[in-house]
Image: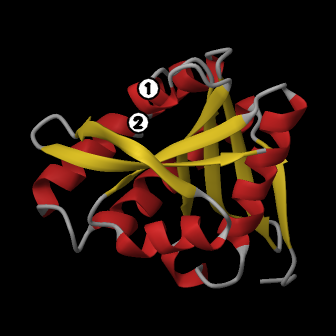
Amino acid sequence: MESSESVIRFAETDDLKLLVALGMTTCYEAYFELDPPRDLAEYCVRSFNEERLKNEFEDANSTFLIAELGERAVGYAKLREGKKIACMAGKNAVEVQRIYVLERLKGRRIGEKLINRCFEIAKERGFETVWLGVWDKNVAAQKFYEKIGMTKAGWTDFSDGKNEFINMVFAKTV
């Protein structure tokens, strides 16, 4: 890689195939040891295909960010406005629906830069709280969110289409 400095930028329309590749790769990497492989593969293909991501990208409530290291895309995040869950009721909150970094680059503070940029955008847009759901079995991610100042705020459920999961909700005032 040409540079050791990561850059966070807004995704553009011509980044769609890049988002598809990052989505499938990073999601599979993040959960391959925890999920049944066929179920995970089906979820990745269903959730990160070009048509679905195009629809998400064009949704006015969605904001995609791409993390680059040496001009190579190495991660991404998606902010989603308007999602309501019980433990955030009454709060002016926005969700970080997805945040992933390539496994081999974890520990280089790219995820921290991505989420901090999400916090900045949320604040710029007038939100007071940022929240996200993380699988209760994903202990490494939970430790990361606690390290950056997020706190447990409740629980929500998640389905991959075949299995039901419990997600812990983490939140931070921005």
Mark identifier at residue 19: none
Quarter holding the C terminus is: top right
In this orientation, does residue 17 appear? no
Residue at 54% across / 59% down in the picture?
100
Q: Secondary structure at mark 1?
A: helix
Q: Secondary structure at mark 2?
A: loop
* Displayed quadrant of residue 79: top right
Q: Is residue 18 left or right of residue 71?
A: left
**Mark 1 residue crowding within 10 angstroms, few (<14) / some (14–19) / many (20+):** few
Mark 1, residue position = 52
- Above or below for 3 versus 10: below
Residue at 41% across / 40% down in the picture?
48
Q: Is residue 48 left or right of residue 9?
A: left
Residue 124 locus on image (x, y percent) = 89, 32
Query: Alpha carbon of mark 1 to alpha carbon of mark 2: how far?
Result: 6 Å
Q: Is residue 90 left or right of residue 133?
A: right
Residue 32 locus on image (x, y percent) = 26, 69
Q: Amino acid at mark 2?
A: Asn
